[in-house]
Amino acid sequence: MSHSADARPGSALSTDVLDSAVFEDLLQSLAAPAAVAAIYCKFLGNAATFIRELASQDVSARVETMHTLKGSAAMLGANRISTIAAQLQKDLHGSIVQVDSVVRELEGELAKFREAAAERLLAAGATLDL
């Protein structure tokens, strides 16, 4: 099944990076691309801070951070970030997690999400200014 409406060939935009339905719902409900851009900008800043802080947190704080990241990512259609955070939240309870690799994985997904959001916002007439 093709998702040609969601992703163009050669485009970073993908429904697993940025859920198109969530984006469109936000765009329709707020009726202002600039407002949607502001929400995504805030999420990207907060997520980057959460990810950066993981290395200095104890296990309990990391679990809480992953819970927060999972929920906020899901609300904005950052499906892969939400899925990774959910898995890490579970893994942190029962095993030793290599924080450096977790940070790199989340930073990579956040960069992909930033690119997809910027592309969608540009198409809607707004920019993602960080």
Image (cartoon, rainbow, N blue to C red):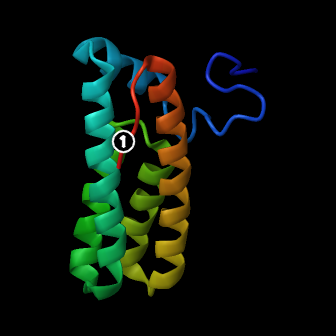
Name the spot of residue 2 as percent of width and height, x first. 75, 20
Residue 114 in the image: above or below residue 58: above
Identify the element where label 1 is drawn: helix
Q: Quadrant of the N terminus?
A: top right
Q: Is residue 72 visible?
A: no
Residue 65 in the image: above or below residue 98: above
Number of numbered callouts drawn: 1
Which one is in front, 96 or 14? Answer: 14
Name the spot of residue 105 as percent of width and height, x first. 54, 67
Q: Is residue 32 visible?
A: yes
Q: Which residue is mark 1?
A: 74
Name the spot of residue 102 as percent of width and height, x first. 49, 74
Residue 72 as seen in the image, left or right of residue 14 = left
Which one is in front, 66 or 123? Answer: 123
Name the spot of residue 79 as percent of width and height, x first. 47, 43
Residue 35 as seen in the image, left or right of residue 117 = left
Which one is in front, 51 or 115? Answer: 115
Estimate how packed mark 1 is, as few (under 14), some (14 to 19) or many (20 or more) residues with alpha carbons within 10 Å. Answer: some
Q: Please identify the quarter of the rendering in which residue 24 is found.
A: top left
> Residue drawn 36% across and 66% down?
89
Q: Please identify the quarter of the rendering in which residue 87 is found.
A: bottom left
> Residue drawn 39% across and 80% down?
94
Q: What amino acid is at disc 1?
A: Ala
> Residue drawn 44% across and 84% down?
95
Q: Please identify the quarter of the rendering in which residue 13 is found.
A: top right
> Residue drawn 55% across and 62% down?
108
Residue 49 in the image: above or below residue 83: below
Residue 16 as seen in the image, left or right of residue 85 = right
